[in-house]
Image (cartoon, grey):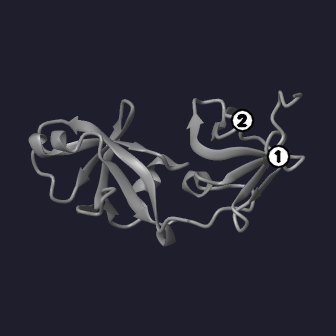
Amino acid sequence: MSDRICIGAIAGAFGVKGEVRLKSFCANPPDIATYGPLTTEDGARSFTVRLTRPVTGGLGARLSGVTTREDAERLKGVTLWAARDALPSLPDDEFYHTDLIGLEVVDTGGRVLGRVRAIFDHGAGDILDIHGPYPMLIPFTRAAVPTVDLTARRIVADPPDSDE
């Protein structure tokens, strides 16, 4: 498990005085400003975040060290990462996406289906992208994924169309 988790991204500049438009990946979007300094993926830059207002498609924010529109524009697409220990603990049936990536996936009979390559959320719920001998997309529901064992780094899946 990673010691940092991606919790947002800079969607672009907003206004002329260095504000940015943030896309928050937090369950409660304004929480992005509460997890301490956020860093870029490579850790080269660190920002404190002060939210300014809701904006179309995200949140308006001021980032420390970003004072001009040009500074803000250069950050477009940069992901923002928080220290894992700054984030809240999750209930037993919830997971950070980063903890699921790379887990082995087996069907209920123990046959290896592959590994979780990505997790997509298109609005109707998360979908696991499984890459391996049996590539597939599996809805991340209790019916389709009855077991997630982070300690064993394994997911047991019962894919909807597993009649092979």
Q: Is residue 29 above or below residue 3?
A: above
Q: 28 or 148, which lies in front?
A: 148
Q: Secondary structure at mark 2?
A: loop
Residue 48, located in which quarter of the rendered image? Answer: bottom left
x and y, in percent, of residue 161 in the image = 83, 27
Circle number at residue 111: 1
The structure residue drawn at horizontal position 17% and vertical position 36%, both measured from the top left corner, is 15
Please state which amino acid type lies under the numbered disc 2: Tyr
- Residue depicted at 23% across the width and 61% down the height: 45
- Quarter of the image with the C terminus in it: top right
Relative side of 22 to 45, left or right = right
Q: Position of residue 34 (x, y in %)?
A: 42, 62
Provide residue 56's location: percent of width, then percent of height: 36, 30
> Which of the two residues, 75 or 54, is positioned nearer the viewer here?
75
- Specify few, some or many for label 2: CA neighbours under 10 Å numbering under 14, 14-19, or 20 or more: few
As drawn, 140 above or below 156: above
Classify mark 1: residues with Cα within 10 Å, few (<14), some (14-19) or many (20+).
few
Residue 140 position by quadrant: top right
Examine the image and state in which quarter residue 103 appears.
bottom right
* Along the viewing direction, whichever of 45 and 116 lies nearer the viewer: 116
| Residue positioned 66% across, 35% down in the render | 125
Mark 1 residue type: Arg
> Which one is in front, 160 or 24?
160
Query: Which comes before the other along the chain, label 2 or label 1?
Result: 1
- x, y (%) of residue 30? 44, 50
Side (left or right) of 3 relative to 131: left
Tell me if label 2 and label 1 are in contact, CB under 8 Å: yes
Residue hosting label 2:
134
Element assignment for label 1? loop
Residue drawn at (59%, 53%) of the image: 102
Left or right of 21? Residue 15 is: left
